Image (cartoon, rainbow, N blue to C red):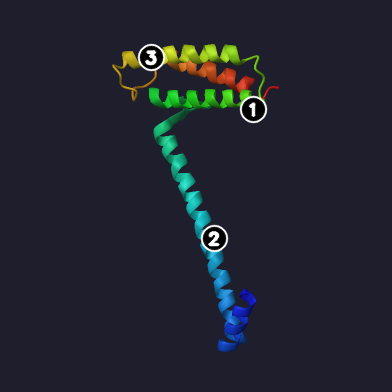
Amino acid sequence: MKSLQLEEIEQTVGHDKTVHLYREIKKRRRIGLGLEVGAAVLFVAIIVLLFAVFGCGTTGDRTTYTTIAATDRAVTLSYDGYVDSVISGQSKTNDLPAISEGFNLFKAAERTAIDAAQGNSGAPPSPEMSRQAGALLQRITNAKGKK
């Protein structure tokens, strides 16, 4: 069906003009694709930049989360990812009790930090909360992917 339409166009405007139009359309598609890819890369770069500025700051080779809420989010996502890997069979279940206990200890330290900050989850995490988060994340890193 498309070839019939192209033949009609070619008969109407001539072969040279048809080839020229085809090349222009092809070039515009490439430019459009380039713009879409560029926009996607720019979007990802902005998200990464925003996360770096507002989510965490780095000191040396360690990442320190700047707020109680950001620390909670990072630890909860890591824990959920680990549990998902256990459910899908990518990680052994042997480490699950210790990691669950570590998660409970982290949550207790988080509640204490929020109480100390008078309910402000935007406050910096307490040293105990940071220590519990680091210990739990290390356990998850060591256990994840073991079969």
Mark 2 or mark 1, which has the lower sequence index? 2
2 or 1: mark nearer the eye: 1
Within 10 Å of disc 2 (Cα), the crowding (few <14, some 14-19, many 20+) is: few
Q: Secondary structure at mark 3?
A: helix
Disc 2 to disc 1: CB gap under 8 Å: no
In the foreground, 71 or 12: 12
What's the CA distance linking mark 2 and mark 1?
A: 36 Å
In the foreground, 78 or 52: 78
Q: Amino acid at mark 2?
A: Leu
Residue at far left of view: 118
Residue at x 68%, y 22% (from the top left corner): 146
Vertical order, 82 against 44 (above or below): above
What's the CA distance linking mark 2 and mark 3?
A: 49 Å
Q: Secondary structure at mark 2?
A: helix
Residue at x 42%, y 32% (from the top left corner): 55
Residue at x 53%, y 60% (from the top left corner): 34
What's the CA distance linking mark 1 and mark 3?
A: 31 Å
Residue holding disc 1: 88
Mark 2 or mark 3, which has the lower sequence index? 2
Quadrant occupied by the C terminus: top right
Q: Secondary structure at mark 1?
A: loop
In the foreground, 133 or 145: 145
Disc 1 to disc 3: CB gap under 8 Å: no
Residue holding disc 3: 111
Task: List x then y, in percent, for residue 51.
Answer: 44, 36
Q: Amino acid at mark 1?
A: Ser
Vertical order, 53 against 45 (above or below): above
Vertical order, 65 against 29 (above or below): above
In the image, which disc is placed on residue 145? Answer: none
